Amino acid sequence: MNATSRLILIIVSMLLLSGTHTKAGPLPQGLIALDGRAAPALTLSDMDGRSFDLKDSRGHWVFVHFWASWCGPCRREMPTIQRLAAAMENTALEIVLVNTAETDDEVFTFLGIVAPDLESLMDRDGLVTERWQPRGLPSSFLVDPAGRLRYVALGGRVWDSPDYVAFLRRLATP
Amino acid sequence: MMRSSVSILLIHFYLIIVTFFATGVSLVAGDDKQEELVVETDALKFRLVPRTPAQMAAFYEGRGFPGAALKEVKKTCFMTAVIRNKSQTVIWLEPERWRFLTDKGELQRLDRSYWRSKWRQLNIPQAKRSTFGWTLLPETRDLRPDEPVGGNIVLPLTDQPFSLEARFATGSDKRGKEIIVRFDTLRCPQDPIQP
């Protein structure tokens, strides 16, 4: 192997290892790439009894967000998710909220004040959340069209900031 | 003798020892004054907020925790820790490596296994166990650059002052320079006596 090929190999390896560039462009700050393992099962109902199964969402990207009303960062982040949902309305990204172990009253009151346009699935005993092993609450995962975990956000994020919206738009564009 | 002194010096070179006498900052929220202790270095920011038993019981009562659970909460000493990794490398949160020391000895942190067994014994509903778990500081976390983490650490209630020596490994393989943060003269705050 000559010096030029060696240099190209090193550069390609560094790019692959850096994990900061994706098919959807540069990874915005605060998102980390995951290893692509299969997303855990997510079958829950919302407050009106409508059921959701993540398996039925194959073929498009899904933003899965775990939250609780008592957590301060969740309170700050939720309005930004509502604005993100509005910004992504005509795209293939599906936004799924999962409340962790709270009651209908708590969730209804919180969302009514903080993000009235959003609805949430109810993980009433918290066991689904535990299976997903988030890094804390709030926590957001991006699941790819094949049902694999691709990215996780570190802590609460300002989801309607231009970097995130642009990144998610690129992901959602086939 | 000489060799051991040199060894100690070398160890000190390998460690970043950050010893701060934490300064109390009063935060005022309505009439409720809450002391917040802060240590900030180039690598991390560490905030510690001691809570009174009544504050913590009120928090969990507001979330529908049963009386038996509140009784247990009131018997203990809660401190909310919020840490942010300001460095460009991984910092390992491992409260198991933290030491809470009084003049009379070490205070043993009441970790998740303690609470799991307590809640099982008291037959506390699963949803409440889950919520309680999420309010605790994680037992381990590879904090990435700019990542925050927060949660409660729980100790047996004591009227003695104590210190916290918190050790953090660094680097994804934990082989980086260790960070040691120290808070001195901590206390479990008591609720004011009602007239």
Image (cartoon, coloured by chain):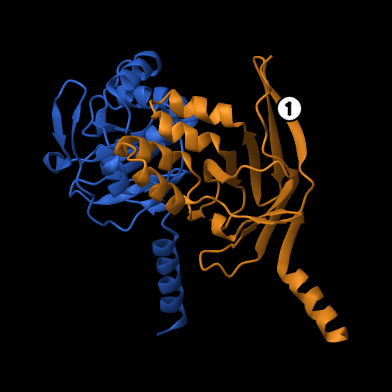
Chain colours: A blue, B orange
Query: Looking at the figure, which quarter contains the C terminus of chain B?
Result: top right
Left or right of A135 in this view: B150: right
Give the crowd class for mark 1: few <14, some 14-19, many >=20 residues within 10 Å: few
Name the residue rendered at 88%, 84% in the picture.
Answer: B2
Q: Position of residue A136 (x, y in %)?
A: 43, 43
Residue at the far left in the pictured view = A56
Q: Position of residue B136 (x, y in %)?
A: 48, 43
Q: Position of residue A150 (x, y in %)?
A: 30, 50
Q: Nearer the viewer, residue A86 or A131?
A: A131
Q: Nearer the viewer, residue A174 or B161?
A: B161
Q: Position of residue A173 (x, y in %)?
A: 24, 38
Q: Nearer the viewer, residue A82 or A73?
A: A73
Name the residue rendered at 40%, 73% in the picture.
Answer: A9
Q: Secondary structure at mark 1?
A: strand
Q: Quadrant of residue B169?
A: bottom right
Name the residue rendered at 74%, 31% in the picture.
Answer: B25
Name the residue rendered at 44%, 43% in the picture.
Answer: A28
Left or right of A1 in this view: B145: right
Q: Which residue is mark 1?
A: B26
- Examine the rendered structure and indicate whether residue A94 appears above or below residue B1: above
What is the three-letter code of the residue carrying label 1?
Answer: Ser
